Image (tube, rainbow, N blue to C red):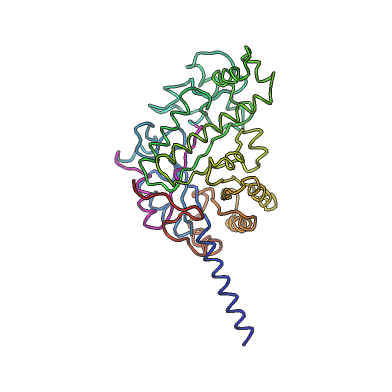
Amino acid sequence: MRSALALILSAALLADETARAADSEVRGLWVVRTALVSPQDVDRVVDQASEGGFNALFVQVRGRGDAFYDSKLVARSVLLERQAAGFDPLARLIDRARARGLQVHGWVNVLLAAHLGQPLQRGHILLEHPEWLMVPRQVAVTVAPRSLPALVGRAARMDPDVEGYYLSPSAPGVREHLEAIVRELVRGYPLDGLHLDFIRYPNPDYDYSRHALEGFRRIRGSNELLGGPAADPAAWDQYRRDVLTTLADSLARAGRYERPGIIVSAAVVPDDGTATSTKYQAWPAWATRGILDALCPMVYTADSRIFRQQVERARAAAGQVPVWAGVGAYRLPLAGVVEKIRLAREAGASGVVVFSHESLQPADWRRLREAAFPVVAAAGRAPGLGTASATR
């Protein structure tokens, strides 16, 4: 009798702990723009996320300098050209997500602006401002701006770290352009969060654009242009970190101004040393300075030991800022996804964000909910952080 009672009490305590975790844990899903190209696709995303036990959608509304929302500043994505002009993927998704109690975070690729080897669509920012391109070291020469895309493209195709054309955060007008995009997006939609991605350099060979070199020369008080970085490499690295930190701070301020209470997060390189020294993404400072409300380290390794170590290290570097561990579902079977979610919890993460929606199969959603997300957080809440205003 006594042992049976103990079992009942143990089960009750476990259920209570699960409910508390669900009420405070972000259970996020990154949704890439190719999953939003029709009304039916949008509805399917929300339905599947709900079935899977997720409580937050990180929706890619800006992928390659295009818009998956109604914008007067950015060209509508060519991926939507077969749809009616009135189709607004983000508006439809928000309406359906609200009905299911899901948060929606607007996922913005900040500096990654275009594919390599594909023509730029009409109205693209790099057609209007080719001088805004981020430039690799081997193209660090004085050329006409119209020549830059071809030169940068040829160099980038030889570099596995480079995923496309990037905007230079040092170029005059770029920060203001990106701020305007954030303001328009956040003002126009009742988003719970603003999620910044590709707010980093591809590798140390970037940014040798004329604007960056001139900016560094002004700081050094030197006459050297091309020789400046080699003459003072430590200062050159710090210059690139500072430019990126200023951009992150500006975008966060713009989002919060337009929608007080919005949650500002960023997808970051998980190892803080690598992020700071080779991507110039000084996210520990972004956390301690209050630039970000949450960090999403992209811990995409399949190795469980490395995964746990990286989450623990990110937690230590983030200070008081919540860490939502990125889980690379595209590299894992479903059992591996479930295991990584468990390890993230054990390592002290405040939640997880799974990459991505398209990596999960139709049969996976219910199984994932049963194995990893048995209880869904309360509708309309932003776990652990409050929630943004639903109307404006």
Farthest residue toward the bottom?
1
Residue 265: image location, x then y, percent: 52, 44
Farthest residue toward the top?
223
- Residue 240: image quadrant is top right
* Residue drawn 62% across the image and 11% down it: 223
- Residue 156: image quadrant is top right
- Asked if the stretch drawn in magenta spans residue 103, the answer is yes
Quadrant occupied by the C terminus: top left
User: For this rendering, which residue is in front, 267 or 385?
Assistant: 385
* Residue drawn 59% across the image and 23% down it: 136
Q: Is residue 327 visible?
A: no
Q: Is residue 214 visible?
A: yes
Quadrant occupied by the N terminus: bottom right
User: For this rendering, which residue is in front, 148 or 261?
Assistant: 261
Residue 157: image location, x then y, percent: 58, 27
- Asked if the stretch drawn in magenta spans residue 317, the answer is no
- Residue 155: image quadrant is top right
Residue 357: image location, x then y, percent: 49, 50
Residue 132: image location, x then y, percent: 49, 23
| Magenta residues (range) | 85-112
